Amino acid sequence: MNIFSSTFTTLEQALNYSSTKQKIISENIANADTPNYKAKDVNLSKSFGSDLESSIQAYRTDQRHFTYKPLSSELTKVFVQNNVQYNNNGNSVDVDKEMSNLASNQIYYNALIERTSGKFSSLLNVIKGGR
């Protein structure tokens, strides 16, 4: 018997992805001046994408609205960007891009935390009997 809906699992996977992305961005920024350091990035997993596809339902109220397109099915992995070089010393870290990624990842993480908190608040309300 599953007490919680699949939403908690999906939120957990999204938080894990965001946490991994935060670590990779931090590594990239920390090594911005390291000679021959290659920037890294993170992809979404097949399982995360399929969980989202099964938990997200799109309802179009008008035929002119965009249709729901599921996430791409890329493998989960941290990969190195080998074919890019921004500095003369062989370093491929673009600090401005990394800071932008850091800010957007922080917004994404905060949204996930808010959603998780809302789910737990709903459960607490049910447990207390609506009081």
Image (cartoon, rainbow, N blue to C red):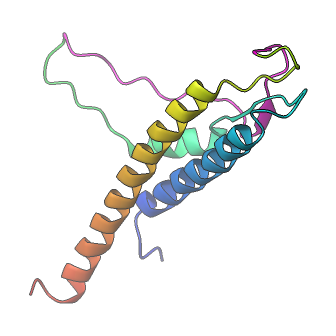
Q: Residue at x 88, y 20 (%)?
A: 89
115 versus 81 height, above or below: below
**Residue 115 location (% of width, % of height):** 33, 58
Q: Quick check: is 5 in the magenta stretch?
A: no
- Horizontal side of residue 10 vs 27, given as left or right: left
Q: Nearer the viewer, residue 41 or 43?
A: 41
- Horizontal side of residue 72 vs 106, given as left or right: right
Q: Quadrant of the C terminus?
A: bottom left
Q: Which residues are magenta?
A: 64-86
- Horizontal side of residue 103 vs 38, given as left or right: left
The mark total stands at 0
**Residue 12 location (% of width, % of height):** 52, 60
Q: Residue at x 44, y 63 (%)?
A: 8
Q: Residue at x 40, y 44 (%)?
A: 107
Give the prevailing secondary structure in the magenta stretch.
loop
Q: Residue at x 46, y 73 (%)?
A: 2
Q: Quadrant of residue 119?
A: bottom left
Q: Quadrant of residue 62?
A: top left
**Residue 64 location (% of width, % of height):** 19, 10
Q: Residue furthest left?
A: 131
Can the viewer see residue 34? yes
Q: Residue furthest top?
A: 64
Can the viewer see residue 53? no
